[in-house]
Amino acid sequence: ARSYSITLLPGDGIGPEVVAVAKDVLSVAGSKEGVELRFREMLMGGAALDAAGVPLPDETLAAARASDAILLGAIGGYKWDNNEKHLKPETGLLNIRAGLGVFANLRPATVLPQLVDASTLKKEVAEGVDIMVVRELTGGIYFGKPRGFGTNDKGEETGFNTEIYSAAEIDRIARVAFEVARKRGGKLCSVDKANVLEASMLWRKRVTAIASEFPDVELSHMYVDNAAMQLVRNPKQFDTIVTNNIFGDILSDEASMITGSIGMLPSASVGESGPGLFEPIHGSAPDIAGQDKANPLATILSAAMLLKYGLGVESAAKRIEAAVTETLDNGFRTGDIYSPGTTLVGCKRMGEEVLKAL
Amino acid sequence: ARSYSITLLPGDGIGPEVVAVAKDVLSVAGSKEGVELRFREMLMGGAALDAAGVPLPDETLAAARASDAILLGAIGGYKWDNNEKHLKPETGLLNIRAGLGVFANLRPATVLPQLVDASTLKKEVAEGVDIMVVRELTGGIYFGKPRGFGTNDKGEETGFNTEIYSAAEIDRIARVAFEVARKRGGKLCSVDKANVLEASMLWRKRVTAIASEFPDVELSHMYVDNAAMQLVRNPKQFDTIVTNNIFGDILSDEASMITGSIGMLPSASVGESGPGLFEPIHGSAPDIAGQDKANPLATILSAAMLLKYGLGVESAAKRIEAAVTETLDNGFRTGDIYSPGTTLVGCKRMGEEVLKAL
Ligand SMILES: CC(C)[C@H](C(=O)O)[C@@H](O)C(=O)O
Ligand SMILES: CC(C)[C@H](C(=O)O)[C@@H](O)C(=O)O
């Protein structure tokens, strides 16, 4: 039997609850396909800060690197919000992304037919939305140097960051995005601000160059401000979107909210080789932590992405997706996606229902 | 009688049509309040590129500076899209903003009761939305240095820009935003990415410091990715938003699309002293240019902002706003805001109806 090691990073807030549920689902789905999964839980985020004084302990990164894939819950909380930068949970997240070299962040924003009413958009605008945002994750203004604080020639304090991309960084994320688009609707929209920023001009030039390797994919370009509008006006016009780190941060969150059910949305972060990082796009929701109210489906669907993109066991991923669909069809809903006429359940029960459906 | 000089910059695409209509409205509204307006039309954008080889001729900037306020139509078009940076219409826009020192860009996003159905958001989510985005306009990554193209240590081509703010730049835009919020709902939300960017950490620190000068305004902070979501989830939670140049570009466009009627939305760009720049937020719409189909109301409402924020003649601004409301109440609609049961009119006719209502 194939056997893989999975690093679990429950993190903070609702992270531990949703990861516990997703772990069971992952185990069962794997075993049905003859895949044995071994789990090791490590500290990250605020949990690591409290226990070890740093948001990403060396042992955590080492264990993650040595494993076949990583499942992360959520990190952060009010408690650490005013920490200095190197002691923020978020810094742990940025460091593990960089440490694993997972430069491609895939964020689906799909409106499921069962949940179309959850969107704040009119039904005819929301239904059928199925977007994949491919966000560059280890470059750009998040990591560019120089960065820091200084003094300008008038003696005033300044804060600064560098948005920088190399041709090689753009080429590799573009290739991932074209591959993804090819397997989806065959349409790729590259989002930039090439009418103002040099970093975006190079982005557009390289994406256009890489397009010649993918003659079957239809490439278009859009400015980021227009993309932010078009997602609201007519989200169905998009198939696959590729963009830089900061624009991807903003647009993927906007796209996810357009579905109305961010408690449902998974993400995958993958690199050239080495283990990928899989996590729900929602946050740690400290206000409902520990109350068995969290929606575990985003983490369960992240586990499906882990099987598909991380381990290449697509059959097991399909099992999970089908089980989630069946659970929704059976009417089970956590509070965030509840509507009259459905059955309100907690985090654990939702997990049990998915296991039953499996 | 008070007398003011206005620079008109019709620009490209539908710019000339909408400016012509707004000019007449401006004249009449001014004269009703005993204010005489003198107009001078200058070249900018693609029109200036074609006629003079640069997107912002020196005479245009000089005339604008010497006048009391500037009304701009729209700039840009396919024709100049592949021009080099210094020959892009957009560069003319950035240069006039910098040249006039108009660091504060006020962008209202208001859902008018007559047009609530134009929004792609559900009626109960869209109705009553009334947001003012205060965007920093002459700093940040749009203007930061160093910028350009280079080669990294692996010999790969790079493109880079600098996001930089000084305390003084943040303080002055924060003060404008607090003043605006004070005259509106008394709530200011500052948007940044202080969990990642040093430029945003300074932003948050300075905005928080300036808050002590405005004890009557309630300040909150939000990360930009969350703001992009919250605008979709529940736009009514926002009163006034203040943010940097690039985040403001993205969020103000998103907010405007939430209203569903970007053909209605004006903007004002003002500095410490000197003339302000007033323009609709929509683009040059080359596809409908010269067909008398454009909606002139955004430019007419920009003229109202010109009277209020540029010349301090608020009574005349109120006249224009009331006339626009009356025209909508009378059922007149251009194509972009048309719905069954209303009267479809062209750009000129819409202008005539507003004049009648005046
Ligand atoms: C927590 C934060 C650093 C992170 C980011 O900006 O990348 C988050 O918003 C995300 O999108 O995963
Ligand atoms: C045309 C472009 C340079 C401009 C900007 O990015 O500022 C536009 O999008 C705007 O918002 O006025």
Image (cartoon, coloured by chain):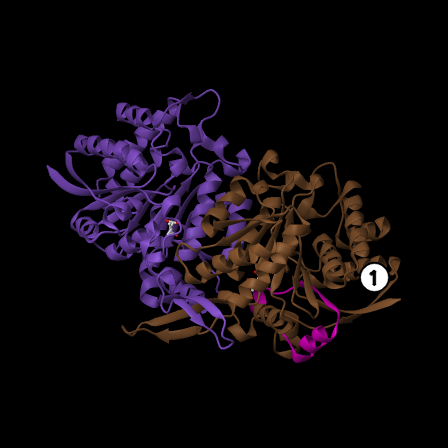
Chain colours: A brown, B purple
Check if residue A73 falls in the magenta segment: yes
Q: Which residue does the image show at 47% across and 52% down from the upper left?
A: A224
Q: Which residue is mark 1?
A: A27
Task: Tell me where the magenta segment starts and ends, as one range.
Answer: A56-80
Image coordinates for residue B274, horizontal then vertical, percent: 20, 53
Left or right: B85 as drawn, with respect to A304: left
B218 w.r.t. A165: above or below: above
Q: Farthest left residue?
A: B1
Left or right: B224 as drawn, with respect to A54: left
A285 w.r.t. B236: above or below: below
Image coordinates for residue B161, horizontal then vertical, percent: 41, 65
Image coordinates for residue B70, horizontal then vertical, percent: 23, 45
Tell me the quadrant of the picture where the C terminus of chain B can be found.
top left
Check if residue A267 falls in the magenta segment: no
B21 w.r.t. A57: above or below: above
Which image quadrant is residue B10 in? top left
